[in-house]
Image (tube, helix red, strand yellow):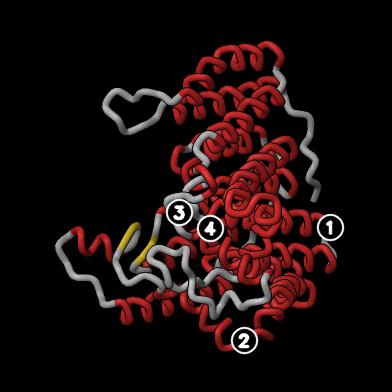
Amino acid sequence: MTFAASAVPRDTVRVAGTLALGAFAVLLVSGRSLDLLGSPSRIGLMLAWPAVALAFWWTGRASVTVAYLMVGGLLLRWVELPPGGAGPSDHLAATYEAIEVWLSGGNPYDHVYRLTRPPGSPVSQPPGELLVHLPGYLVSGLAGVQLTQLVAAGAVMAGFAWAAARWSWTAGLSGLALYAGAPNLVLLATDGSNDTVVGAGLLLALLALGWAVRRGDGAALLLAGAAGGFAVAIKQLALPIPVALAAYAVRRFGWRLGLRYAGGAAALLLVVSVPFLVMGPVEYVTGLLGFIGAHDDVYGWNIWSLVQGLGGTAWDTASAAVLTLAVGLVVLAGLLAIPWRSLAGAALGGVSGTLVVMFAARWTTYAYFGLVWPVMLAVPLVLAWERRSNPEERAA
C-alpha cells in the first residue's frame, strides 16, 4: 500500500474545496435564536468567505481552503475559551487538581476533590489524562489544562488536512470543514470537558494503524498499538475503537504480527499505570471502575432518557450499571469476533460500538460525542485510501 495520492485533476480539487467552503459557511451561520445574529468572530469569518472562495477558485490551490478552515476553526474555539480555564464542566478542573496532587507526591485516586461540582465527587480519569494535560498545567495552570483542548482540536484539523492531501481531497476537506465549524464541537473544546483530546488520540490511533499497514512490520504495529492504548489511557470510553482496530490487525497480518498491536497497547497502559498501582492498587482500580456509575441521575443521550421521555421509569443506578457493563462486554466481544476486512470498516465498527455503550448508560453527556466524531469523519478518508491502494478489496 502507499499513502501518496496520485495526481489529482484540478476540477476534483475545486469540487472538494467548494464543497468544504459551503459546508463551513452553513455551519458559521447556524444557530438556535430567532434572528440568528452572529458573533464578531463568525461575522468576520463570513466577511472573509467571498474573498477566500474566489481566491481558491482562481488559483485552484487547496492550501487556500485548508488555511481558511483551520484558522477559522481555531478562532471559533479561541474566542470561546473561558476566563481562567474554568468551563461549565468540572472535568478539567478535576484534572488540574489531580495533577496538582500527583506532583506534590499524593495519590490522585484516594484524594477528596475540592474543585468538582459538588466538592468530593469521585474522579475516575486514567493516568493518560494527567500526562496529556501536564504540559499545559506546567505552562499556565488551569488555563493551560483547558488550552490543551484547543491544541488537540488543531491537531485533529491538521490530521484531516494531511490525510486529504494524500488520500482524498473530497473526503478530507469535507471532514475538516465539518469538524472546524460544527458549533457543538467548538463548544466541546471550551466547556471544560476532555473529549476533544480523546478524539484527537483516537484519530491518531487510526492514522497510526494505517501507517503500520503500509509498513507491514511488527515494530510499526507496536507503535500503532501504543497510540491506541494511549487514547484508552485518557478515557475508558475510547476502548471499543482500538479493540476493533486490533481485531482488524489480527485478521490482516495473522496472530503473530497482529498481536503486536494489542501488545503495544497493553504495554503503554501498563507503563502509565505502574506508578499509581504502586501508590495504591486498590484505590487505583476502584477509581478507574468508578466511571461506570459515577452519576446517580439520568441525563443526556441514552435509552433511559428516551424511556423517561416516553413516560416510563428508568432502572435504578445499580441495575443500570450492571446492564452498561454487560453491554460493554458484549460489544467488545463482538468487535473482536467480527473478521474486519478493511480498516475503514473496523473504524466504523468501533465508533458504532462506542455509541452503543454510551446509549446503554444512565448518564451520557453530549461531550462524549466529541471523542467519536473525528474517527467517524475520517472513515471516508481511510476508505478512499484503501480503495485506491487495493481496489480489489471489498469493504467490510
Q: How far apart are marks 2 and 1 (CA)?
A: 40 Å
Q: Name the residue under label 3.
A: 367
**Secondary structure state at the residue bearing disc 3:** helix
Q: What type is the residue that disc 1 sits on?
A: Arg
Instruction: Give the mark nearest the N terminus, 2 or 4.
Output: 4
Q: Which residue is drawn at 41% across and 72% down?
A: 294
Give whichever of 325, 90 is nearer the camera.
90
What residue do we see at 60% from left, 12% from top? 51
Alpha carbon separation for disc pair 4 and 1 = 37 Å
The image shows residue 135 at horizontal and vertical percentages of 71, 55
Q: Earlier in the sequence, mark 4 or mark 1?
A: 4
Q: What element carries label 4?
A: helix
Q: Tell me the SS state at disc 1.
A: helix
Q: Residue 92 carries which label?
A: 4
Question: Which of label 3 and label 2 is nearer to you?
Answer: 2
- Seen from the viewer's position, the closer of residues 61 and 85 is 85
